[in-house]
Image (cartoon, coloured by chain):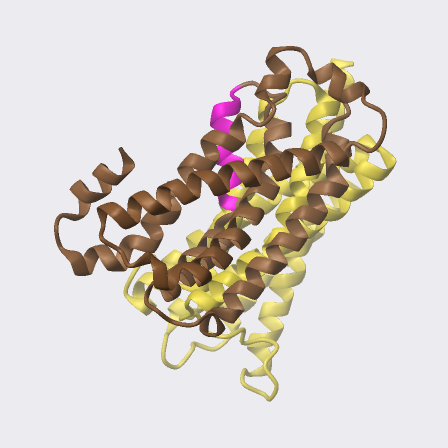
Chain colours: A yellow, B brown
Amino acid sequence: MRTLLGGVTLAGLVGGLVMGLGIAPREMTQGNVQRIMYLHVPSVWVAYLAFAVVLVASIVYLVRRAEAADRLAHASAEVGVLFTGLTIATGSIWGKPTWGTWWTWDARLTTVSILFVMYLGYLLLRGMIDDRERGARFAAVLGIVAAFNIPLVHFSVLWWRTLHQPPSLMKPGPTMPGIIVAALLVNFAAFTLLYVYFVSRRTRVLRLEAEAEA
Amino acid sequence: MLLFVFQFALGPDRERLAGTLPGLLWLGFILSGLLGLGRTFLVERENDCWEGLLLAPGDKSAIYVGKLVGNILLMLVIETILLVLFGFFFNLDLASALPGLAVVIALGTVAFAAVGTLFAAMTAQVRARELLFPVLLLPVEAPVLLATVKATEAVLLGETLGSVAHWLKLLAAADVVYVAVGVLTFDFVMEG
């Protein structure tokens, strides 16, 4: 089952890359640089998805005390931090030729980097606590606080300043040719599968670790 | 001491000082707040009252609210002292800005202390707590700091509170969310 999921994910990623880098037309003003969007936008989607899963799994853990929920939260947070990092990296690579700088204190860049640091702290807290049950409880509390904080971070930084283009997918009216949308959607699906695959692998490792210790 | 460092870093240029003052003021509040908040539960740890707290009948959230109120009061006292010192050393006209400033500081302090008290209870039970506490707290407080610094800046420039209403709403929302989450999750922090 897991191998099958891995295979499908791999096929989806390859397909998404071919569509994004090969088939989709070159963007008029930005040129080939724009193609990094096919990695950047799905990455940030996965990051937010992962943090949402952390929230739900944390609440479930505190209510039910199911260790599986704790492992899910742990794995999801790790994958989320990874993809937040990927988002920042791909965004930087895109920003250098387009905005002329690796980094700027734009609203969304700031928001995403605050999330990155926040969830790094979450993983750090987990690493610092030896007692498994206590670590799970504290991490769940932190996971809930961090998730409720995301909207606050979002709006505060938005009012502070913004330079980032508004999201291009949900805008009404046909702004992008169908093939670009299709390539983006394939990548969305592939990245989501990749997230599920990573998390299922990671939860398995965590479960085996717990069993080995017990 | 902090005040001296700020003065050294910025030099005698009054214009630049005025521009950076709100940030510096909150930097001072945060540093003093971190020191105070981080020690919230240390007394209980050191003299073994922790078990007493755990055994206490009734809702654990009462402990949270008590510690929170204590922390808020403590921070407000320190902030008042710092504010007076800032006004004295940097020759600020605090009197006219005071009502607005008080609102901003009160809202910001509640938000800061609400998460700080919750996290202090967690990190009190963890090794390397001095390291972990600010690492956890500061990123979470990022929106609060942003809002307070912006609102303080506006108030010090003599603008009305109405012009920063959106920041105040954000702070109020943060206060409500943080205190609610703190009250609801504190039970789980105090279990063992």
Vertical placement of residue A193 versus B46, above or below: below
Q: x, y percentage for residue B136?
A: 53, 37
- Would you say B104 lies left or right of B68 here? left
If the image is split into quadrants, where does the C terminus of chain B sit? top right
If the image is split into quadrants, where does the N terminus of chain B sit? top left
Residue found at the very far bottom of the displayed protein:
A173
Task: Return the residue nearer the eye: B83 or B176.
Answer: B83
Q: x, y percentage for residue A183?
A: 59, 70
**Which picture quadrant has residue B13?**
bottom left
Vertical placement of residue B171 versus B132, above or below: below
- Would you say B39 lies left or right of A196 here? left
Residue found at the very far front of the displayed protein:
B95
Magenta residues (range): B128-139
Regarding residue A61, the answer to whether it shows in the image is: yes
Task: Return the residue nearer the eye: A150 or A77.
Answer: A150
Magenta stretch, main secondary structure, is helix
Regarding residue A87, the answer to whether it shows in the image is: no
Q: Residue at x 52, y 72 (%)?
A: A23
Task: Return the residue nearer the eye: A99 or B56.
Answer: B56
Q: Residue at x 80, y 37 (%)?
A: A61
Q: x, y percentage for residue B27?
A: 37, 44
